Image: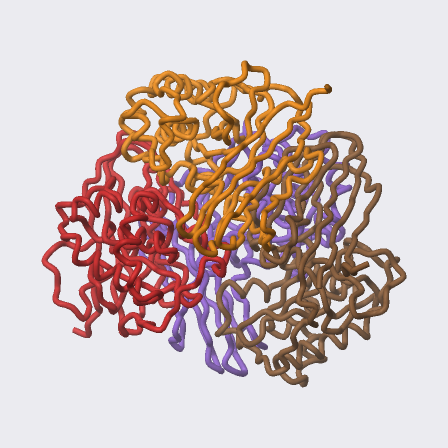
Chain colours: A purple, B brown, C orange, D red
Amino acid sequence: MQIRVGYDVSYTLPQPTAMILTLNIHHSRVSDLVRPDHLLTSPSVRLEPYRDGFGNWCTRLTAPAGKFRIWTDTIINDSGQPEPAAPEAQQVPPEQLPSDVLIFLLGSRYCETDELSDIAWRMFEHAPMGWGRVQAICDFVHRHIAFGYEYADPTLTALGAFNERRGVCRDFAHLAITLCRCMNIPARYCTGYLGDIGVPPAAAPMDFAASFEAYLGHQWHTFDPRNNARRIGRVLIARGRDAADVAINTTFGAHTLDTFLVRTEEVTGT
Amino acid sequence: MQIRVGYDVSYTLPQPTAMILTLNIHHSRVSDLVRPDHLLTSPSVRLEPYRDGFGNWCTRLTAPAGKFRIWTDTIINDSGQPEPAAPEAQQVPPEQLPSDVLIFLLGSRYCETDELSDIAWRMFEHAPMGWGRVQAICDFVHRHIAFGYEYADPTLTALGAFNERRGVCRDFAHLAITLCRCMNIPARYCTGYLGDIGVPPAAAPMDFAASFEAYLGHQWHTFDPRNNARRIGRVLIARGRDAADVAINTTFGAHTLDTFLVRTEEVTGT
Amino acid sequence: MQIRVGYDVSYTLPQPTAMILTLNIHHSRVSDLVRPDHLLTSPSVRLEPYRDGFGNWCTRLTAPAGKFRIWTDTIINDSGQPEPAAPEAQQVPPEQLPSDVLIFLLGSRYCETDELSDIAWRMFEHAPMGWGRVQAICDFVHRHIAFGYEYADPTLTALGAFNERRGVCRDFAHLAITLCRCMNIPARYCTGYLGDIGVPPAAAPMDFAASFEAYLGHQWHTFDPRNNARRIGRVLIARGRDAADVAINTTFGAHTLDTFLVRTEEVTGT
Amino acid sequence: MQIRVGYDVSYTLPQPTAMILTLNIHHSRVSDLVRPDHLLTSPSVRLEPYRDGFGNWCTRLTAPAGKFRIWTDTIINDSGQPEPAAPEAQQVPPEQLPSDVLIFLLGSRYCETDELSDIAWRMFEHAPMGWGRVQAICDFVHRHIAFGYEYADPTLTALGAFNERRGVCRDFAHLAITLCRCMNIPARYCTGYLGDIGVPPAAAPMDFAASFEAYLGHQWHTFDPRNNARRIGRVLIARGRDAADVAINTTFGAHTLDTFLVRTEEVTGT
């Protein structure tokens, strides 16, 4: 299967503005690209790639004042298979976790483990450990939060989403990540593309899609509490502690977002 | 000058409990130690060292159920000089920051840059850039927050401290860090020992002391908005994005803290 | 049980000489010490502790020209139990090894994995995986090498010991480590004290004792191919890739070793 | 100046095989990349990044049985200037070396400092200290070893190269590193790209190029005893104790190398 992925974003900038972009397809999927997902800009500026502490490739640039557009449009090969499930995956006790995984147990900007720990233990102490417990958390989050683009709020945290019971996919992910961490299951935030492949088309315009990975059985496994299903055609962009680490654009200065378009769709033969 | 530093902490644990301890003096000060600051436990347990992603040496252990005590007591050589000031240190524009410094511009668990950005710009846009701006932030935080041990709250964030106008040293640090980051000045959280050296003795029992470092003139510089002074005899333990990264003890399970004692005092000749 | 451990080493130095000493009991056993194992020198010199990349605490000093003596004498509490065996411990496939463990699969100064790989696979391909395979390697090494202090040679490697079939405890360890690594089992070198506790007293003077740890079932386990037994009262000093990383003394210049004494004995009531 | 760098390597694997690849351009040069040097594979497999203990970015993967190809092709900006020389750089006495540099004085897999110490002191005791001594070592190694691709032997060590007087660039580097370490000058192994820029084109097919860094005047300086010249356009991939730490591919199982191609060439305007 081939999937067309891309975005087109434009800004108006009152002055030359430094930006960090986390917009390239994750290096672990680059071999699947039919053509490179070069980040294109207009006007053309010097792009400086770097790798953040999580291994994501990011791009730095300084955009000139005025209109500034960033886009890509590419095609990626995909297995066309749903994400694998591993119901037998065991929880790794904290003392056996690799030391570089421990950071994914700690609190982070949008994941207040300290605030939600008691609630998590009350709710999930009796759930089966391992895969079952993560699935129970996803089931809960999926039921508990009402999805709506109108609820998008870049300052909303897991605790906020838990209390307000509404949000977008990143809030589903933040709440599930936080509950997993409270239960001593390492969890990290993922952002990427996710099209309506194998599911009815959504009415809303597309956006990047948040999911998360939980560390079970000495491997990372993908979960998606927003959709709560093993999906086809998810394309990873970046991973981090939460959305703060993998903002698609961190802009150092005032700016206006003029247009924002994300595309993810199966390439059909016709 | 020699400074005696140490701590003595004890817990009651209902069951065997995994712990991560960030309690060793920072590797950058190790060569000043008169003797190693070994972490001692009673009962004795297997200790496993590792270095976290910020370079701090951490210790993992599994404590048995029952009473569990952790302590150290050592002596460190110190210059006896106040921390240097560098009023000429310039701000580094975002596009020139080393890529591994960029993470210290982002939001983190206790530093809600997104929530405080507008406030920061309103307050500090006209402060001189560089050292002067960080000092202006420290002056503000020092005045704005009332210090009191009774305000200690492990879930309090920079925004909370800004609104409630009270806190302990870590809250002073979190607010100043957040305001610096909002102004595009990288800032990282520091924890360590700080005795009453060169200042009148405090009435309160001692604790670990939070401060922060700001990146100016291509170097990190120490600031302490709680005391708002260049101090003598600060001994660094660990650095991270905020207090979530350098908790002295991350405990994976329920526990009671029975005693908590920190010592930092000049070794005198008598 | 209490064990008295210590050493007494003296040198004649033609000129002031920098030294690195890896002579302190490993930090993970410091809580068991009845009194600190301070490294004592005559004449007294400034000692500078530091931590190497493996987490061992080391000591740097500059010894003056002339006679220079280093010693310690202390007592450590011990469980008195033989080292635990874990015959069920599984081999961790390379793709699931923590990334900081991978270095213990590579070749190192005295462990030529490249030279011994074919031999290792021929000999151990059909041994049961996991604990059984490491034990089979220890059994082989124990039989293959003749022990003798007269064979001590600081430049002897695993390949040399394999070919010459003789050596001291460090050669047994190097050969077993190398064979484990060839079979994709991470293995690291250990040095420490080991007295004749629970075994008939040896005729020879004591020395530090080499052993190794293999990574099985997501934990490190101790093996001792020289004695090929679960022993009582082993006291760890340091761990590394091989003996090159944990030399008790690395001396930067010419020197004469005048005396060398190591003591490890059970403290009895009389 | 822009330099096109890349490689194309293919294997036949009898069974699914875990690999560690150290093939990305070093993080210190990443901001010079015109586009990321993503590691591409066919078939596409899951790539997992990690940073080794020397700070190099590595990639882990499990290749399927059958044909497996790995390649990259990218462009990097370069100053076009020869590597700087610093003839005034002083030797740092061992007691003043930073503790994390000390490991680069010890023996390692291909650098038998113990075997070559006497020879080193006899040859270089009267060479000027500091830069001059390292240069004298490079001059000696350059003269002493005959270069020839037919001498390539992955088990050849510094001692072997010294005795056999032949080898490839990694053997030149290993011998010079060993001699430096014997003279108490920290030295570390480097691998990277090096094209025929500013020099006559070589007849032989390209390969990765070994060089080394010596620690003088509190900085690391590049030396290349194979070419014994300050070259233009060297692109670092990784650093370690010797070639064992930075193998481009560590493969956990039997395999056949089918093709191996490295490209490094100036991008010209035509």
User: In terms of image quadrants, where is residue C156?
Assistant: top left
Q: Quick check: can you spot residue D51?
A: no
Q: Residue at x 75, y 53 (%)?
A: A164
Residue D223 coordinates in the image, percent (x, y): 29, 62
Q: Assign the N terminus of chain A to one quadrant of the image.
A: top left
Q: Residue at x 60, y 55 (%)?
A: B30
Residue C188 left/right relative to A215: left
Query: Compared with residue B13, is residue B199 higher up or lower down, i.e. above or below?
Result: below
Which is more toward the observer, A86 or C257?
Answer: C257
User: In terms of image quadrants, where is residue C264?
Assistant: top right
Query: Compared with residue D136, is residue C200 higher up or lower down, i.e. above or below?
Result: above
Residue B45 coordinates in the image, percent (x, y): 67, 33
User: In terms of image quadrants, where is residue B270?
Assistant: bottom right
Which is more toward the observer, A265 or C189?
Answer: C189
Q: Residue at x 55, y 54 (%)?
A: A203
Residue D98 coordinates in the image, percent (x, y): 49, 59
Q: Quick check: can you spot residue B44?
A: yes
Query: Compared with residue D198, is residue D126 higher up or lower down, i.e. above or below?
Result: above
Query: Compared with residue D161, is residue C202 higher up or lower down, i.e. above or below?
Result: above
Residue A267 left/right relative to A159: left
| Identity of the residue furthest to the front in this view | C66
Residue D58 coordinates in the image, percent (x, y): 40, 49
| Identity of the residue furthest to the left in this view | D203
